[in-house]
Image (tube, coloured by chain):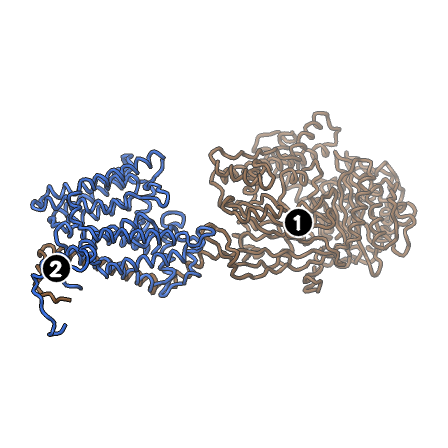
Chain colours: A brown, B blue
Amino acid sequence: MPQRVEERIRPITPQLAWRVAVLGGIAFVLFGIVFFRLWYLQVLSGQDYVSRASENRVRKERIEAPRGNIVDRHGETLVQTKRAKVVQIRPSSLPESVREQAEAYRKELAAAEADRLKAADRYEAYVRQLRDDGKRDTREQKRTARQLRRHARQARRVPIPELPESEAELGRLYRRLGDKLNIRPSTIHERVIRGLADAPYSNVTIRTDVDPAVFNYMRERPEYFPGVEVTNRYLRQYPHSKLAAQLFGTISEITEEQRKSDDERFEGIPQGTRIGQSGLEATYDKYLRGVDGYSRVVVDAFGRRDEKRELSVTEPKQGQRLKLTLDYDLQRAGDRALAQAIQASVHGAKAGAYVAMDPRNGAILAMGSQPGFDASVFARPFSQSTYENLTSEEKGAPLLNRATESAYPIGSVFKPFTALAALEAGVLKVNQTINDDGKYELGPQKYQNAKGAAYGTIDLRKAMTVSSDVFFYHLGEWLNAEGPKLQRVAKRFGFGRKTGIDLTSERAGLVPDRKWRDGAYERYQECVEKAGLTPGTTAALYECGGVERGWSTGDNVNLAVGQGDLQATPLQVAVAYSALANGGTIVTPHLGKAIEDGNGIPLQQLRAKPKRKVKIPEAHRDAILDGLRAAANDEGGTSSDVFAGWPKEHTVYGKTGTAERQPNPDQSWYACFVKDGGRPIVVVVTVERGGFGAETAAPAARLILSEWFDVGDTEFIQGSDQSN
Amino acid sequence: MTATQPIHPASEPPPPLVPREWRLRLDPLLLLASLGLVAASLITLRSSTQNDVPGDPMYFVKRQAVYAVVGLVLMYGVSRLDYSRLRELRYPLYGVLLVTIIGVTALGAATRGARSWIELGFFNYQPSELGKVLLVVALAGFLVERMREMGRQTTARVMLLGLLPTMIVMAQPDLGSATVYIAGTLAILFVAGAPLRHFAALGALFALSITFVLVAAPKLGVEVLKPYQVDRLTAFLHPSSDPADAGYQQAQALTAIGSGEKTGRGPENATQTDLGFLPEARTDFIYAVIGETWGFVGCALVLSLYALLIWRALHILTIAKNLFGALIAGGVAVMLLFQLFVNIGMNVGIMPITGVTAPLLSFGGSSMLSTFLALGLLHSINAQARETAERKGRATVFQ
């Protein structure tokens, strides 16, 4: 190549050179900025961004642990768990307007329920007033009572608001969901509103038990179903459907209030966990709940799971097994016997309850309440109609466990405790006799035995055997002079206070005394004065409650035979009779026997310590037990014909009761025990509108005892006794 | 060279062995930078778009490769021509610029949507991209005519000529291209030697109009910028405010780049890209993909290729045989610098999100072709300068 002669470059103009230099400088600075920015991002703080990137794509998904099973004392499964596919809506994805609707709905609902409770109070007070005035009810009064009862039984219906027009997007989602799940969009909206009203932060379950094909379709296309969660859930299953349905209780997501509360039961439970909310599920929740597992899954920017890249799984651990003290066979027999008793009533009985308990330690062997229901309703969220069916008085409120949640006057079943009080106070001697001419007068008030029977001169044993009211009216009158002696004894045996059973709801009942009635009357007077009402009128009753007079001897006389304002649950009666049977130990009734692992290996025995010991002088106890024995065994005893042919080796000590519950027909009661060495048992049966004690309750008790002692009775033997 | 070789006088040019056009050389470093960037683009697209089109893992790579080849051919063709001839074509070029961008804007308006491209079957032709080159050439032509009177009038006229297409693309709305036009216009004025006080005045004017657009106009109910544009422009000031809005994109891009650390996570583990967290991973945020996949090393390499590109462009500016060439080179250099800085800046979270793509790196035919067209002009300026120098016996220093 030819060599060129170098010549000087013609320099570019100084101005241009300067300007190019400026441009070059700017470029240099810009590159420098980017370079150091990169250095800062990638080299200095890269680690932060690595973790941020992994947070982005890794989602911790909870795998719900199946709850532990519940079995009876012999290992028969009463409650188990099954896997189901559910479709839910996340509340956070719902528009504000819908959440406001739900809130308004909740408030309306609460208002309606408050009104219902008010009506219920008025009704009760009104009925008490009608009873207390001693006059025949006029047609007007009856109509008012009926009206009140209707309002008291059913809260007014609150309509569910419709989806606002403006939420077309949500409407489309509802339609898409409805198409896939075969539910009307309006029903979906209804469930959303009700679910939000119930628990504003919990997922709303739209459908459980979804078809697998639909389940997979929805799971793979989250973009079509924004805010919808498609997951596996464990549902409760109840192999014996109705059996002991009231005891198990409900399970639902932990509420925001519970999470925020200081209650240590809810400590450390993550949001969205389903916990037992009532019944045994709640009491033994920490054992039954199990430990949730987690899977860390990789998701893309649209929330789709990247199935190929599952990161890690912590397997959930099933909850422990709860062994109950219940005896499945006895429970079944009890349910059947109670159903027969209800059937046998000529007064239109629909409801009743029974308790069978070991008097030594309070282990409940069987406990039932009618009307019952299929426990499977607990497996999925209640619909409005299900809920109404379960709680409305019209349908007999099957959800109510009448053995612990209903307190009634108990009639003559209470008499042993009146007798004990009288003996203790010294107003009655063991062998003292009283003349029962069938009538008893206290001032202007006239009392008499049921059907006007007169038993002549009788002692305590005889009075118990035949259930003489006049005898106990006298005791009531005499005891009134001793202050609240009768009340103190009754309370010592557990009346008027909770038994401490391992269920979430229990009524304490009421043992009326001077303090209670005078206090209530004082409040009534103050209230009437303040409102400017005339005492004794219906208006005053509505405003101020039904206690329109202070304590009088008549109240104690009524209490002596288990009437008047006395309120007790069948379970309380069982506890009190246990004390009679075991010599004075007030047991704590309980259903939980042991916690076991999945294979039935016991991990922990559940013990219920007795509450206290009541001193019962031997002579007093002998007299009362003799009376109870005679009542069930000897000629003339109130339940002796019911127990005709009962094997002598299992001696029954039993007391009938007939509680007046105006304006309703009488309530039938029977409380009994068998002291049989190895297998003692206390049985209490009550039938609302069941008539006399021997009529329905006692025969049912015999059938339960027969199952327990394997006697083989099948016949429902109605007694003829017509005493209170 | 040895002493035995004969020395030819400078007045005697070597005998032409091949036709003149064939001898025109391409600037090797500029070529190397552009090829390197295209290669980086193809490799990145290969690893990040495999699953984007089901059944065709090479869908985007193939297309980008075709654009690049067409672009290279175009570049080579342009580099063979003497760019000086374009000076006479400044009016037609400016006319084509206006007609195409007005056309596409009108078309977009007719279809009731924001559209800044015309579908041409094989790719969507985006006139505003080609417009960048046309604008530079046309404005350079205008300015050369008025070089002797670099007064206020000239500055104002050139600014107006530049602002007209700017306004039109802004209406498309293509805010990114609009800012590039402004940058190009200012660059040409700067290289042409407009007094600095003019720039100061323009700066003040700009500040005023920004206040008007962002503050006054919305209050008067006139919407100059779409709300999402305002959003995007201000999002980088608060990048992590809410992962649901404009700040989200920025945050995801930062996460992608940062998580690449020194040497990157490799194509297999680049989850930000793979799982779709990174928005616009093929175009606006391709630099973040490089950052995540190959880390600081990859980013720095690409950055140096760009630096090489800009350096060569500025160098060619200095050797241009005439002012027209210098102005074109200046305009092209600044436009490229501006685009790459705005794009990379928004990737690393120091600039607002404007939709400006990275030249030669982002996927897209229009951008690729117009960039290669601009590079072709640079090569042409370079070749012409060297040839002239050679003819005049003047050596250019090869740096």
- Where residue B134 appears, as percent x and y from the top left, is 22, 45
Q: Secondary structure at mark 1?
A: loop
The image position of residue B315, as x and y in percent, is 17, 58
Q: Give the class, few, some or many, for how many residues have Cα within 10 Å of label 2's Cα (few <14, many ≥20).
A: some
Position of B387 with respect to A538 (left or right) is: left
The circle on residue A249 is 1
Residue type at numbered disc 1? Gly
Question: Which residue carries the number 2 mark?
Answer: B390
Viewer-proximal residue among A201 and A444: A201
Chain ID of residue with mark 2: B
Residue located at (70% from left, 61% from top):
A594
Q: Which mark is residue A561?
A: none
Q: Nearer the viewer, mark 1 or mark 2?
A: 2
Determine the CA span between mark 1 and mark 2: 100 Å
Q: Residue A475, percent across and down?
A: 79, 45
Please determine whether, in this image, residue B368 is positioned above or below residue B398: above
Front position in the image: A231 or A334? A231
